[in-house]
Amino acid sequence: MTTYVTLLKFTSEGPEGITDFGKAWDQAGQNIAALGVRIVGAYGLLGPYDMMIVYEAPDQKTAAKLPLSLASLEGGIKTETWTTIPLGDFVKLPEQLQK
């Protein structure tokens, strides 16, 4: 399984448009569980992004379902998703360039 990171930013409607953010997040979590992804962690952030979800998925198409499913959160969000490479594998990449 590959690990992905999705960063979330609330739009100008933001969490003010969600009457009960905790309830909305619980519902989103139930929806996410049915997508074939495994949540590794979810965090509130202080900085340019408001939340981060770290998760595993068997392929890119399955991984793409997570940010798409977050559209169910009222109030509006923007997402950015990254693929990760385990650091042990990442540090070996320069060796592969020399071959």
Image (cartoon, rainbow, N blue to C red):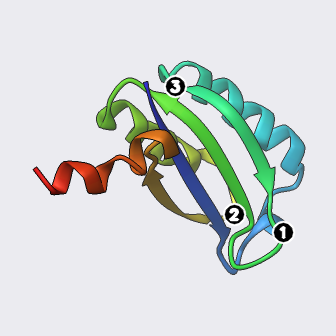
The image quadrant that residue 13 belongs to is bottom right
Whichever of labels 3 and 2 marks the residue nearer the N terminus, that label is 3
Q: Residue at 60% across / 45% down in the picture?
A: 72
Whichever of labels 1 and 2 marks the residue nearer the N terminus, that label is 1
Q: Are marks 1 and 2 in contact (CB under 8 Å)?
A: yes
Whichever of labels 3 and 1 marks the residue nearer the N terminus, that label is 1
The image quadrant that residue 97 belongs to is bottom left
Q: Estimate the spatial distance between the alpha carbons at disc 3 and disc 1, rounded to whole Å.
A: 28 Å
Q: Which residue is mark 2?
A: 75
Q: Residue at 45% across / 55% down in the picture?
A: 82
Q: Viewer-proximal residue, 9 or 98? A: 98
- Relative to 75, residue 42 above or below: above
Give the residue type that dot 2 points to.
Gly
Q: Residue at 74% across / 70% down in the picture?
A: 14
Q: Which residue is mark 3?
A: 37
Give the residue type that dot 3 points to.
Val
Mark 1: secondary structure? helix
